[in-house]
């Protein structure tokens, strides 16, 4: 019984893997396919050896993480630290897991970033090298996004300023004024349903007076507003924890649920875009800045002061692919820009230098057909609290 259950778990993992099926599984294509390369054989043999070394409870955790694609919260899958031999080379166990279940093309541990808000082992020990084990849950890792990469060819459009620029500026001024008026609500209310602290385990559950007093004693690090084109929907969401999930649908998720924000007469582009938000993203406050992790199945587009190129005063929108992370606000670079006093002025959006704009699915800016963030169907405005 033990062996059959374990074998069933391994089979479920292989069905979710990114490994190309063997020729025995592709009889119809046997004539069109040559024998497996030595590298493929070595990789499969190494992966099978790796799975055999996992306990049954670890296999169950791995199955849950892989089948939910990170939608469910799963525990760490700890494995003894040390490189595993893969043919003539070696590979780290967590890199092997990422190649097996998420990114077959990842080559080195330097391409990956630990998601500390998911990985309890990293939070507990601070440094996994001291514990002698490494977490191999592939959904406790993300790929690092390279902001210097150019956008895809299909998005390279000439810059076209809108004809009615005065109307655009007036709308922007009104939106910024509305945002300033609602600052008094930042620490009290977050959505149409009222304050929804991120530290509650149950999403949008009512909190006691003691919990509310604790929130007032703690200092929030950012506020998040959700926009549809030029209209802000709902109230500011105040973030106290070091990370926050922003999503439309997320199993067992807590954080800022955009699905609870209702608005009448939504346009068709907005409805289509909202349907694709899914698990959304996670914003994480870390020692070096603010990071964004794309949990959805579609790209995110981001701009902030520290993502621009100060010497050339270039406004730049960065693309974050699904499963990738990007440092969307760099604290060190922000301090340098404040000293230099040469901040590039954004063509649209809030003037606040500590603000971040994030658009779901649709890009904007000089390289896209939409020149302004207010032309995007669904987007977020993240306003960071001033430093102490």
Image: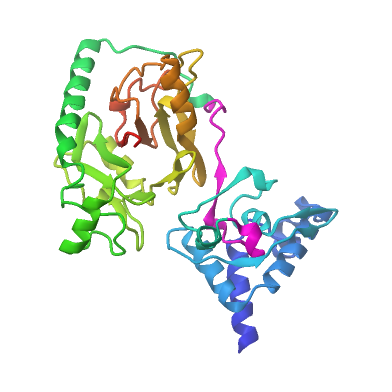
Quarter of the image that includes the N terminus: bottom right
348 w.r.t. 277: above or below? above
Splitting the image into 4 quarters, where does residue 206 fall?
bottom left
Residue 34 or residue 137, whichever sits in front:
137
x, y percent for residue 369: 39, 21
9 or 243: nearer the viewer: 243
| Quadrant, the C terminus | top left
Queried whether the magenta region covers residue 149, the answer comes back as yes
Bounds of the magenta segment:
127-152
Question: Residue sitting at 35 percent across and 32 percent down?
Answer: 357
Residue 328 image-quadrant placement:
top left
Q: Give the residue drawn at x 43%, y 48%.
A: 296
Write the residue at 18% across / 36% down.
183
Q: Position of residue 258 (x, y in %)?
A: 27, 48
Left or right of 37, for residue 343: left
Q: Is residue 207 visible?
A: no
Horizontal side of 367 relative to 50 (left or right) equals: left
| Image spot of residue 130 (x, y percent) | 64, 60
**Residue 334: % across, % down:** 44, 27
Residue drawn at point x = 46 percent, y = 41 percent? 291
Snapshot quadrant of residue 292: top left
């Amino acid at each position: 019984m033990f062996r059959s259950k374990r074998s069933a778990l391994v089979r479920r993992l292989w069905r979710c893997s990114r490994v190309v099926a063997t020729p025995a599984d592709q009889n119809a294509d046997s004539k069109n396919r040559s024998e497996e390369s030595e590298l493929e054989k070595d990789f499969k043999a190494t992966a099978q050896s790796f799975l055999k070394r996992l306990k049954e409870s670890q296999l169950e955790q791995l199955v849950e993480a892989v089948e939910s694609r990170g939608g469910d919260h799963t525990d760490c899958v700890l494995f003894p630290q040390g490189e595993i031999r893969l043919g003539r080379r070696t590979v780290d166990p967590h890199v092997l897991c990422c190649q097996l279940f998420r990114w077959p093309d990842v080559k080195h541990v330097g391409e990956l970033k630990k998601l500390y808000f998911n990985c309890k082992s990293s939070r507990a020990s601070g440094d996994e090298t001291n514990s002698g084990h490494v977490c191999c849950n592939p959904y406790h890792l993300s790929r690092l996004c390279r902001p210097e990469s150019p956008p895809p060819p299909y998005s390279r459009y000439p810059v076209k300023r809108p004809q009615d620029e005065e109307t655009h500026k007036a709308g922007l001024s009104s939106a910024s004024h509305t945002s300033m008026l609602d600052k008094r609500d930042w620490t009290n209310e977050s959505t149409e349903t009222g304050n929804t602290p991120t530290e509650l385990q149950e999403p949008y559950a009512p909190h006691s007076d003691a919990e509310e007093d604790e929130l007032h004693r703690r200092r929030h690090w950012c506020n998040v507003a959700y926009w549809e084109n030029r209209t802000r929907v709902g109230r500011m969401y105040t973030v106290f924890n070091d990370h926050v999930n922003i999503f439309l649908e997320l199993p067992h998720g807590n954080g800022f649920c955009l699905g609870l924000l209702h608005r009448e007469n939504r346009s068709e582009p907005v409805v289509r875009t909202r349907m694709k938000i899914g698990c959304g993203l996670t914003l994480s406050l870390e020692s070096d800045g603010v990071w964004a992790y794309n949990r959805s199945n579609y790209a995110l587009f981001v701009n902030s002061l520290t993502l621009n190129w100060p010497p050339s005063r270039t406004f730049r929108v960065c693309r974050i692919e699904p499963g990738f992370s990007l440092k969307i606000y760099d604290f060190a670079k922000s301090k340098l820009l404040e000293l230099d006093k040469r901040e590039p002025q954004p063509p649209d959006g809030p003037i606040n230098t500590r603000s971040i704009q994030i658009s779901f699915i649709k890009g904007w800016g000089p390289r896209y057909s939409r020149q302004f963030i207010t032309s995007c169907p669904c987007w977020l405005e993240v306003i960071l609290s001033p430093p102490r």
